[in-house]
Image (cartoon, helix red, strand yellow):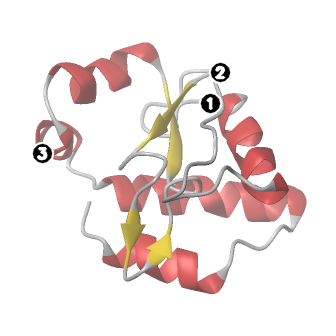
Amino acid sequence: MQRKPTPNTRGANADEKRFMNYTKHSDCVQCGREGPSIVDHVAGATYKHNKTLIGHWFVIPLCVDCDDVKTQGSTRKFKQTFEVTMAQLWSRHVTAWDVMTRADIPRDVQLAILDCGK
């Protein structure tokens, strides 16, 4: 389901939608279980860090089991269980995206995601 634009935020643009579609059809970035996967908006679709909207880009593919660790617990529990941050998983997922499509995620978005501490 696509979030509709509001006065405080915009909807996803074409590049962001393409990345979310790629994410949906990717294998789980944590355990490698074959997709399609749940597209997990790590911090929510409207999340901003350092005044940069990163919510539409900060998505990772998770299988049902890996997603349950986060959904039933928390991001902290996920980090403790798998010993990896969401930003590290996102970075791993983006590396595959860049190789497959040569699409560039805006540099300010990359820096904001890697800096957000999630």
Residue 57 drawn at (x, y percent): 58, 57
Q: Residue at x 64, y 24 (%)?
A: 1
Q: Residue at x 63, y 60 (%)?
A: 94
Q: Residues within 10 Å of mark 1 (few under 14, many from 20)?
A: many
Alpha-carbon distance for marks 1 and 3?
Answer: 22 Å
Residue 25 drawn at (x, y percent): 73, 28
Q: Residue at x 66, y 32 (%)?
A: 2
Pointer 2 residue: 35
Q: Residue at x 49, y 47 (%)?
A: 45
Disc marking residue 17? none
Q: Residues within 10 Å of mark 3 (few under 14, many from 20)?
A: some
| Three-letter residue code for mark 3 | Arg
Q: Nearer the viewer, mark 2 or mark 3?
A: 3
Label whose residue precedes the other's in the sequence (2 or 3): 2
21 left or right of 51 in image: right
Pointer 1 residue: 27
Pointer 3 residue: 76
